[in-house]
Image (cartoon, coloured by chain):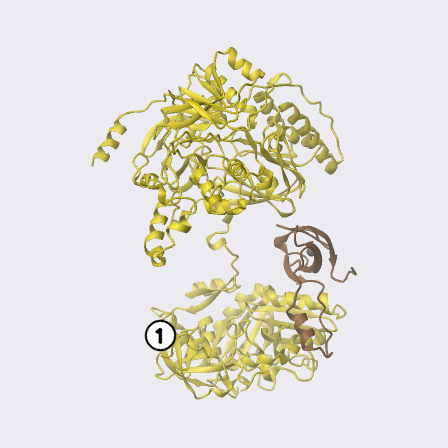
Chain colours: A brown, B yellow
Amino acid sequence: MLHIKCPYCGLRPQTEFSYGGDATVKRPELNKEVSDQDWDNFVYLRKSPRGKHLELWQHISGCRQWIKVERDTLTHEISTTYKANENI
Amino acid sequence: MKYLQHTKQTKIYKMSENFRLDKGGLINRNKKISFKFNGKKYFGYEGDTLASALLANGVHLVGRSFKYHRPRGFFGAGVDEPYAIVQMNRNNEVDPNVRATEQELFEGLEAKSVNCWPNVNFDIGAINNFLNIFFPAGFYYKTFMWPKSFWYKIYEPIIRKAAGFGAASIKHDKERYEHKYEYCDLLIAGTGPSGLASAYAAAKNGAKVILAEDKSRYGGSLLTSEVTIGNQSGKEWAEQIISELKSMPNVIVKNRSQVFGYYDHNMLVMSERVSDHLPKTDKYTPKQRLWYIRAEQVIISSGSIERPLVFGNNDAPGVMLSSAAKEYLKIYGVLVGKNPIVFTNNDSGYETAIEFKKNGVDPIILDTRKDANSEIIKEAKELNINIKFSYVVVAAKGYKKVNSADIAKISDDKKVISNIENIKCDCICVSGFWTPTIHLASQSGSKTKFNEEIDAFVPSISKQKETTLGSANGVFTLEETLKTSFEKGSELSKQITNKENKISIPTVVEKKSSKHDKFWCVPLPEGKNYKRFLDFQNDVAVSDIQLALREGYRSIEHVKRYTTLGMATDQGKTSNLNGLQLVSEVENKVVPQVGHTTFRPPYTPVSIGAIVGREVGKHSKPTRKSPMHHWHEKNNAVFVDAGVWLRPRYYKRGNENLFEASKREAKNVRQNVGVCDVTTLGKIDIKGPDSAEFLNRVYTNAWLKLPVGKARYGVMLREDGIVMDDGTTTRISDNHYHMTTTTAQAANVLSHLEYYLQLVWPELNVNVVSSTEQWAGAAIAGPKSREVLQKLFPDLNVSNEGLPFMGYMEGNLFGVNAKIFRISFSGELAYEVNVESDNGNYMWEKIIEIGKEFNIQPYGTEALSTLRIEMGHVAGSELDGRTIPYDNSLEGLVSKKKDFIGKRSLSKTAYIAPDRQKIVGVVPIDKKTSIPEGSYLVKDAKAKLPNPKLGHVSASCWSVEYDNPFSLAILKDGKNMIGKKLFAMSPLKNKVIPVEIVSSHYVDPKGERVRS
Ligand SMILES: [Zn+2]
């Protein structure tokens, strides 16, 4: 079971969090023309890297904040966690 | 009949404890304990295990092997035991898969053998032993594959009956199991010398330590070895350290506790057998407890397990590990035999032989080495023990118990055996040197390396924060073990506590050993075909591995699966390494090249009960109840699970069934007025100056112009265009909105909103918070609902003008504040009244009381469904995560002007296809036959399979308006299907029903009632 350091609450067990996928995906801006392909990329296509992965987790049973977690998909090691609005 | 008489006779023949020494051991001889094995009564002492007590009684036959049903005895004395699996009866519960070597004796214990029928003495399955040509490596894959139909009808049922150890109970387990979560600085697994020393050093530095021992007694090898630490014996030293550790507030010491799994981020799981050693579990005490331990650092001091030597019929009862024989002697005062052969390739066997000799039994030592000299060997010689160097056991003789052995001289190159002779014996104690228990380190992800010195793998580079010490790390001298363990315990704890208490390392007196012999497998004599077993639990013999390799299996992982080597419940604790040695020999590779298979948790079997813990029955998930729950109960509500909520499904009157009651309730809503508990609806409080803009982006329809005091129905999508949820949101004040969600989606919707506010549009000044539990809700629905509302709020103007459809106002309900929404799910004139949860029951009783004169009746979820289905209002069965707004006829709510979440997806080709699926109504032609939910709609009921499916029935009801069945369906090209005749097919219910497609708005299609 992972041990995730919520930037607000500290180290907490994985069971307090829910996974939110790739944190590098950026939603296209509202009211802007988006090509079919760009939209499909945004909605469906995700990389599945072997190694470092920046991902979203929500601390649902804690502060309810969405946070960014840099996790190694191979070793499950978590190197850093960031607040949602933190620049990386 | 003969067999029955035989049992009777043995019963009369009373066994006494023939193999117990008069003194010695750590058992309590003042407390005799009686127990039953296979229906027969025996006695042992407090402190015995079932195994030691049976051995004291001379019982060596305890089971039958898995594949060949060969007789099985005891091989070990602890966790590594591959044979002695028994079925326990304890406290009226059945416990299968119990290792007799670990089960402590208690008064009245009852156990029986497994994997044998009709009994352990006469096992019909043993015929497999003589038909073993049918059971070679991979026999499951080969023998039973053809013809295919035979598998289901003949092979599988027979294999199922014959295979497996023990039978699980089919009853509900009444025992209590618990989970516990703990954090510590150091978790130390094992209380042998390395565990004790490191724990002591760490504890002295102020670290929070958890020290776990899987056995009942602490001390590991110190309990059976002849060593001195300081001025104490090893055992005394262990006792002193343990009692000191127990007195320290920063230390948790646990026996009967197996750390069985090493998971991510230094999370380890330990199974504590709290009550298994007692006749019954005390009230409020668990049978077993699972500990989830998050440790800053882990010390693995799990010791090592003796390796078997491999020779003919080496699985016969009476052949056992020499360390186990020594343990039975020194801890339990039990002789495993009175005429023992000790067969060894190292000095450990000598220790066992010396113990025998000291207790008046003459052993013979067969040492595979040509010659060896050490203090221990010298001692054995001085005791006049008969030692034969360059000697091996070729084969054990005796079926249910060893009675002699063929022994032989072996050549220096270990290839030729000669001078075979048969000698009498009643047990063969084998020692093939030691295998470090590296399971936990391997589970952690650590790399392992092959240590040529000891012919075994040891941990090398740690992956997580773990350190392996002592013999688990391949260190077999006590002096070095203590030194490194004190140092490591101190070093690791100092890093955490920044404290250092110097401890002087005690001097150690121990006997030095000479080098072991790498030889481990005795060649077959010419013309002999003895089975030489590697895996004693799964019956994998040397010949099976050889066959697998001949058939082309190369990877050790494949060999393992093909032959089932090491795949039994003992996880190959005694077999893995010998298997590897064999593969490397045949393949002409060195062992590290072959590599070992992956160790996976659990190290020992864990009961399902312990894994489940307290989350059974009604505790398997939380149950949420509305504030009006008690009223519903008193008024004969029959409840249904709605997510984690309990909701009234219907209120039973007299002998009514579900159908009759829900029909009555729904009809009363259509004719008079009903009241429904809607507390469970998700509620989200939304505040902030940008709330309107936010809602405008979240919902598909326009929200910027919603006035204060008005509610609006909204649909929200996922980015892929699929409907996520629907509900009404009301503008309470300028910057304050009250959102409702469906009961099931409440949590997801909140997360969804938080996602966009925190990550996508952080510039929006909006706050959302769940308020589901703050409000109790009642829906008052029906043509007479306004009259009821007026009487509830006499001061308010609730006329159609004063409180129009989708209007909102606040009122005072006999002293409590209330929110009144004119919204309707039933399609009737309806209102929802919310009060603070604490006042929920008060509100409810007032509504019932005032509604009496209007014939108000409470209605449950079944009537609610009926009402919404015949109105064509969509709910969870249509918004099922597969439908877009168009499919649910919600396209009118999709704004063309503004952008919103998921809008871009709605222009996907499939979503705008002219024959896109759409919601429709379905009525059976006969107006009588209800259509099962989930039925397929097809054009031709008799078409060849697979019959093209046009759609599916999502929800069914009995229309109270028309008094006939009515269903909703999602149908391909639904828009153009109205009036068509199709078939509803339910293969599950074996029904084919001719149906007509109609509008989904079966009742009041113009929606006049809600506005009346
Ligand atoms: Zn948090």
Quadrant location, the N terminus of chain B: top left
Query: Is the residue at mark 1 in contact range of ligand 1, meaning its CB lies under 8 Å from it?
Result: no
Q: Residue at x 51, y 56 (%)?
A: B621
Residue under the image location 62 percent in, 73 percent down: B720
Residue furthest toward the right? A87
Name the kind of residue labelled 1 in the image: Lys
The chain under label 1 reads B
Closest to the observer, B774 or B226: B226
Q: Is residue B335 above or below residue B948?
A: above
The answer to whether residue B176 is seen in the rendering is no
Q: Nearer the viewer, residue B20 or B476?
A: B476
Residue B109 is drawn in which quadrant? top left
- At 62% across and 72% down in the image, what residue appears? B718
Q: What residue is at 39 percent from the left and 24 percent from the top?
A: B405
- Secondary structure beneath dot 1 equals strand
Determine which residue is flagged by label 1: B991
Quarter of the image for residue B901 reads bottom right
Foreground residue among B442 and B102: B442
- Residue B58: name its quadrant: top left
Q: Position of residue B278 (x, y in %)?
A: 44, 34
> So how many labels did they put on this image?
1
Which residue is at the front of the view, B666 or B654? B666
